[in-house]
Each structure stands twice: as structure tokens, then as C-alpha cells.
Image (tube, rainbow, N blue to C red):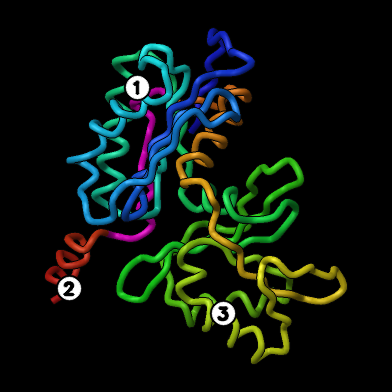
């Protein structure tokens, strides 16, 4: 639960450092309010634990700031890479303690929706979960680019997801790498039920149900993690380091194996 910090002197334009380690490559960003000072995508083949602190050091130098000037830290809380989430959360918790600043936990699928969806749209945000499965969440993006949850984040097969989406009978914007990975299946599911499927660039009409596929954002995901962190900062919906929690959505492979042994 977010903690209110009544004694925090909220700057009109705070300096935000964001850490996104939920995806395979990950990303980092430093924003002065909504202005991006620095952003960097990680390397998909590199371990977050081996590169994160190095890239953070490079980032503050490139942005022309110092760590002690940071006003708020924002970090993805999941779902996503189990190891990556643990690394990112541990790093931000350590920085929050050291710098004595508040933090904001940002759900990964919220950040994806914020990055790619149009305003005032019903969104299904998708992130690959391995083994052909997906992390998914139904969301709504308001005119003010606030994120409203229409359901909890879930771990699901594409087939079950499309069956659930077809039952909604509404216009849906599909966003995220998971959507682009399964674009052909989304198109087929829509057309099989007589639902219009369009590319993001095409204009949408309000009198028919339409499924659209969003383009990837030109910014790294950490920028939108920072922007959502900025909203929480202004609303004083802040967390102490000890309150940050990961939402893995599903058990880890180790936990699944243990469950199988117990059931066997």
C-alpha cells in the first residue's frame, strides 16, 4: 500500500530516476519533470546484476546530475523476469535507503500501456512470459493518461486470452511486445468473429468494435516508468524502501518444480 509522506516538500519539477528490469533488455532513465535528460536501453544478452550499477553511474554523468539530487526513484514491480525484478528492486531499495528518498513501484503492464496506448482507450497489455505464454492485463487509459485496472495481471496462454477478449465485445488496443509477437493470432481471432482489425496508424471509428495493434514506443520503457512515478510523486502516493514489493503473477520455475514434487 502506498504511504502518504505529509512532510515531503514536493517540488513542482522533481528529478526522477527510473529502473526497468522486468524485460529482457531492461532500461534506465532520468527525467527532470517530464523532460528526458537521459535514457538507455540495456543489452538483452547481459545480466542486469552485472550492468545495472555501471549504467546508472554512466547515466547520472550523461544527464549532468548527481545521485544526491534525485527526488524520487521509480522501479518496475512486475510481472516480468524474476531475476531482473529482484535485481531492480534490490538496487532501488538500496538507493532509497542511501539517498533517503521515497520510491514508487510501477506495474510493468501499466508502463507498457502508458507508453503505447492512445488516450481514452481500453487496452490489453501483453508481455512474453516464456514457453509461448503471456503476462496480460486489461486496462483503461484515461484522457489524463492515468491507468485504471479493469482486471488483475494474469499469466495465460494466447488461446485463453483471446477467448476472454472475444467475450468482452468491445474495442481493444493491444499493446506491448507480447502483442506484436502474437499479432497474427490476434488478427485471426478478431477476423474469425467479424471484428475489424486495424494497424495503429489507421483511424478508428466509434460505432464498431475494433481491435488495433499499437506501435512500439520510440522511448525506452523506463521513461514511462518515470512518468508514472512522477504522477505518484505529485499525488504523494510514495513508498518507503521497505514497502517495495514484486508482483511475479505466477510461481517461479523453482517453485513450480517444488509443487510438482510435493504433488507427486
> Badge 3, how many Cα within 10 Å: few under 14, some, many 20+?
many
Residue at label 3? 186
Instruction: Report the front residue among 65 and 261.
Output: 65
**Would you place residue 83 above or below residue 211 in this image?**
above
Of tags 2 and 3, which is closer to the observer?
3
* Distance between the alpha carbons at the discs numbered 3 and 1: 43 Å
> Badge 1, how many Cα within 10 Å: few under 14, some, many 20+?
few
Earlier sequence position, callout 2 versus callout 3: 3
Q: Is residue 164 left or right of residue 209?
A: left
Snapshot quadrant of residue 232: top right
Earlier sequence position, callout 2 versus callout 1: 1
- Label 3 residue SS: helix
Snapshot quadrant of residue 130: bottom left
Question: Residue 228 location in percent, x, y?
Answer: 56, 37
In the image, what residue occupies the spot 52% across and 52% down? 112
Of tags 2 and 1, which is closer to the observer?
1
Residue at label 2? 263
> Badge 2, how many Cα within 10 Å: few under 14, some, many 20+?
few
* Distance between the alpha carbons at the discs numbered 2 and 1: 53 Å
In the image, what residue occupies the spot 73% across and 75% down? 210
Secondary structure, magenta segment, majority class: loop
Instruction: Report the front residue among 95 and 242.
Output: 95
Q: Is residue 48 left or right of residue 210?
A: left
Question: Residue 144 location in percent, x, y?
Answer: 73, 40
Residue at label 1? 61
Region rendered in magenta: 240-251
* Distance between the alpha carbons at the discs numbered 2 and 3: 35 Å
Instruction: Give yes or no for contact between labels 3 and 1 (Cβ–Cβ under 8 Å).
Output: no
Amino acid at each position: 500500500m502506498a504511504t502518504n509522506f505529509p512532510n515531503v516538500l514536493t517540488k513542482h519539477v522533481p528529478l526522477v530516476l527510473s529502473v526497468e528490469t522486468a524485460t529482457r533488455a531492461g532500461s534506465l532513465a532520468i527525467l527532470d519533470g517530464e523532460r528526458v535528460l537521459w535514457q538507455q536501453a540495456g543489452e538483452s544478452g547481459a545480466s542486469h546484476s552485472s550492468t545495472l550499477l555501471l549504467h546508472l553511474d554512466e547515466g547520472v554523468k550523461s544527464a549532468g546530475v548527481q545521485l544526491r539530487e534525485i527526488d524520487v526513484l521509480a522501479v518496475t514491480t512486475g510481472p516480468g523476469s524474476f531475476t531482473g525484478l529482484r535485481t531492480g528492486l534490490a538496487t532501488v531499495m538500496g538507493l532509497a535507503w542511501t539517498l533517503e528518498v521515497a520510491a514508487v513501484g510501477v506495474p510493468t503492464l501499466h508502463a507498457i500501456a502508458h507508453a503505447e496506448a492512445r488516450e481514452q482507450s481500453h487496452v490489453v497489455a501483453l508481455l512474453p512470459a516464456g514457453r509461448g505464454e503471456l503476462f496480460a492485463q486489461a486496462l483503461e487509459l484515461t484522457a489524463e493518461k492515468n491507468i485504471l485496472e479493469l482486471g488483475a495481471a494474469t499469466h495465460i496462454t494466447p488461446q485463453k486470452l483471446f477467448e476472454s477478449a472475444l467475450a468482452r465485445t468491445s474495442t481493444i488496443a493491444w499493446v506491448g511486445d507480447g502483442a506484436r509477437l502474437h499479432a497474427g493470432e490476434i488478427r485471426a481471432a478478431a477476423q474469425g468473429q467479424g471484428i475489424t482489425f486495424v494497424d495503429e496508424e489507421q483511424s478508428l471509428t466509434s460505432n464498431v468494435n475494433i481491435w488495433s495493434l499499437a506501435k512500439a514506443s520510440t522511448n525506452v520503457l523506463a521513461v514511462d516508468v518515470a512518468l508514472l512515478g512522477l504522477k505518484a510523486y505529485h499525488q504523494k502516493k510514495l513508498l518507503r524502501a521497505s514497502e517495495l514489493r514484486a508482483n511475479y503473477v505466477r510461481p517461479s520455475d523453482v517453485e513450480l518444480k517444488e509443487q510438482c514434487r510435493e504433488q507427486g
